[in-house]
Each structure stands twice: as structure tokens, then as C-alpha cells.
């Protein structure tokens, strides 16, 4: 039950980056996006992944696999598209 | 030890939104920011907060108090500044 809440929260967290990914690849403009933000999100995603793995907290693990993937894509877009 | 990792990950997660908040209030431009992203981040932050409270997972609780605050500010900026 509480695990279900965790998976729902995680799906929304990861899902929250999808509109930003769509917008970024549609407009190919990233001027208003912060490089620092996405660099930190990739780093913190990796640390949360470790935290979740050590605690066997699978909602945290699943969420952060998604986070590292999407924030990594946005960081690459920021570097690429300007 | 693992709790320390969680707090470090949480500080980076919340900290990752600070450059975006600074940039947004400096430029007062939010065209490239996705409304949907920040609306979902506020929602998922509230759910993670509940998850952390039920599990007594304090790094998760502290992180999501910060997340709801900062993503709420950015959502308000998106509505306000256009």
C-alpha cells in the first residue's frame, strides 16, 4: 500500500520531466533552462539511486533510474541546443 | 551513514532548483519552462512527503519539504511572469 504510494509518487516525479523534454525538443531552445539545475539533478539522482539500493527501497530506485535518464537528456540538450 | 547519503542526495536535489529560481527571478522570463513539469513536481513532492512520513524516512521528508517549496515558487513564477 505504502509502496504503491511510492511508485505513484515516482511515476509523477519522472513524468514531470516529460513535458520539459517534449518542449525542449520541439522548440530546440534552452535559453531559460539552468545548466546548474540539470547538472545537480543528474548528480543527486545517482546518489538517490545508491540510497534506494542500500535500503532496498524500490520506489526510490525506480524513480531515480528514470530521473538520471531524463535529466541527463535535458542536460545534453542544454549543451547541444544553447 | 546511509542516512547521511540520503541527506546529501536531498540537499543536492533541492539545491538543483536554486539556480533555476535565481535565473527565473533575474530574467523574469519563463517561456522555455514547462508549466506541466512544475505542476507535476509540486504534486509528486506532496506524495513523496507522505511516503517519507509513513516510512519515517527523514531524508525523504526533508527533501520533499524543500521540493514542494521551490517548485511551488517556480510554478507561481511561470503563471506570473509568462
Image (cartoon, coloured by chain):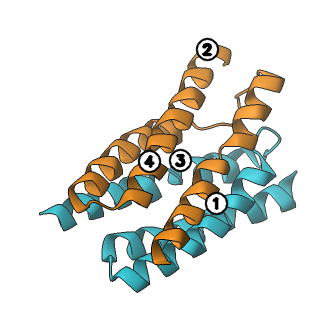
Chain colours: A orange, B cyan
Measuring from the top left, give residue B66's x and y in whole percent: 49, 70
Q: CA distance from mark 2 to mark 3?
A: 19 Å
Q: Is residue B6 above or below residue B26?
A: below
Which residue position holds label 4? A64
State whether residue B14 appears in this view: yes
Measuring from the top left, give residue A61's x and y in whole percent: 38, 51
Of the two numbered discs 1 and 3 on the same chain, state the one appearing first in sequence.
3
Q: Mark 3 — on which chain does it sit?
A: B
Of the two numbered discs 4 and 2 on the same chain, state the one appearing first in sequence.
4
Q: Mark 2 — on which chain does it sit?
A: A
User: Which of the two marks, 4 or 1, is nearer to us in this view?
Assistant: 4
Q: CA distance from mark 4 to mark 3?
A: 21 Å
Q: Are marks 4 and 1 on the same chain?
A: no
Residue at horizontal 53 percent and vertical 53 percent from the top: B17
What mark, if any, has residue B41 been given in the picture? 1
Q: CA distance from mark 1 to mark 3?
A: 16 Å
Q: Mark 1 — on which chain does it sit?
A: B
Identify which residue, A50 or A25, lies in the foreground: A50
Which residue position holds label 2? A80
Residue at horizontal 50 percent and vertical 67 percent from the top: A6
Q: Residues within 10 Å of mark 1 (few under 14, many from 20)?
A: many
Measuring from the top left, give residue B25's x and y in whole percent: 68, 54
State whether residue B65 appears in this view: no
User: Which of the two marks, 2 or 1, is nearer to us in this view?
Assistant: 1
**Toward which corner of the image does residue B33 lie, by quadrant?**
top right
Which residue position holds label 3? B19
**Toward which corner of the image does residue B15 lie, by quadrant?**
bottom left
Q: Quadrant of the N terminus of chain B?
A: bottom left
Amino acid at each position: 500500500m505504502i509502496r504503491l504510494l511510492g511508485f505513484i509518487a515516482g511515476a509523477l516525479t519522472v513524468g514531470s520531466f516529460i513535458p520539459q523534454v517534449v518542449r525542449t525538443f520541439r522548440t530546440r531552445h534552452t535559453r531559460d533552462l539552468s545548466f546548474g539545475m540539470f547538472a545537480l539533478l543528474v548528480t543527486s539522482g545517482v546518489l538517490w539511486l545508491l540510497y534506494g539500493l542500500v535500503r532496498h527501497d524500490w520506489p526510490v530506485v525506480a524513480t531515480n533510474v528514470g530521473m538520471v535518464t531524463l535529466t541527463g537528456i535535458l542536460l545534453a540538450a542544454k549543451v547541444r541546443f544553447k
